[in-house]
Every structure is written in C-alpha cells, then in structure tokens.
Amino acid sequence: MKRLYSIKSKDEMDLIFKEKNSVGNGYFGVYYKKHDLSYFKFAISIGRKYGNAVERNLAKRRIRYIVSLYKNQLKHMMFVIVVKPSVRELDYNDMLSQLEKLLNRAKLLEKEDHANA
C-alpha cells in the first residue's frame, strides 16, 4: 500500500475523531470523515493491550492487506480503523469478513459487495 493512502499527522487523526462519525462492532471501530482529495486515506490504531509488538504488527499487516483488496471500491474519505484486543481471537478470514461488514455499515465501500480474495 502506497504512503499516499496513509494518514501521517496526528492533526488529521484528531479531525477525524472530532467529526464523531463512527461505526463499530466487538472487534473494530471505524471513524470516518469526508475530504476533497481524489483518493482515500486511512490509519490503523492499535493499543498495547492487544499484545506484544509482533502480534500488533501482524494485525496491522493483515488489516493493510484487507484495505488494499478494497482500494478500488473505497470512497474518497479519510478513516481510522481502531483495533480492539478481541481481534486476537480471529483468524484472517474472520478478520476480512468482520472488517468488510463494518466498512459496508460505514458506507465507505461502493456498491460492489465483495473483493476477489
């Protein structure tokens, strides 16, 4: 995933959190905000309660890959994916389905329902 798609500053993240548009489930939370660019931008927030650095990096890698699967369907918005500690129970396929449902609920995906995974 290119650096172009990532939110780099804390100020941008704070703007998204202040907007208070969010959806969530037991595993993830997604905060989102519209912006004027011709592409989406995202960040992943994962706390230390999740586990050690190896586990956190694995989860972030999987989430970045899932977002890359949907990059052609994502609307031009900024969003932050907040990872809850309960995600540790999920394998990759469950993580994919939970995140897809959440992105659909947040109306961040275009009408095509499923990426070719």
Image: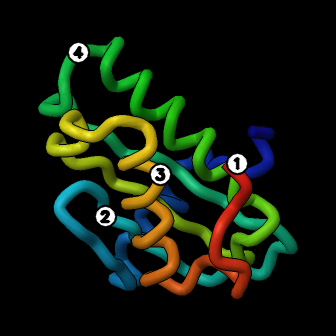
68 above or below 78? above
Point out the frontmost of discs 2 and 1. Answer: 1
Amino acid type indicated by mark 1: Ser
The mark tally for this picture is 4
Image position of 69 (left or right of 66) = right
Point out the frontmost of discs 2 and 3. Answer: 3
74 above or below 90? below
Sequence-earlier tag: 3 or 4: 4
Contact flag, marks 2 and 4 (Cβ < 8 Å): no
- Label 2: state its secondary structure: strand
Report how far apart the C-alphas of labels 2 and 4 lie in the structure.
21 Å
Query: Residue 50, located in which quarter of the rendered image?
Result: top left
Residue at the spot of label 2 = 29
Using a 10 Å C-alpha cutoff, classify the residue at mark 4 as few (fewer than 14 neighbours), some (14 to 19) or many (20 or more): few
Sequence-earlier tag: 2 or 4: 2
Task: List x then y, in percent, for residue 30.
Answer: 39, 67
Quadrant of the rendering where the N terminus is positioned:
top right
Residue at the spot of label 1 = 68
Residue at the spot of label 3 = 96
Query: Residue 18, located in which quarter of the rendered image?
Result: bottom left
Report how far apart the C-alphas of labels 3 and 1 lie in the structure.
12 Å
Task: List x then y, in percent, for residue 96.
Answer: 47, 51
Identity of the residue drawn at 79% across and 47% down: 4
Report how far apart the C-alphas of labels 3 and 4 lie in the structure.
22 Å
Task: List x then y, in percent, for residue 56.
Answer: 34, 25
Contact flag, marks 2 and 3 (Cβ < 8 Å): no
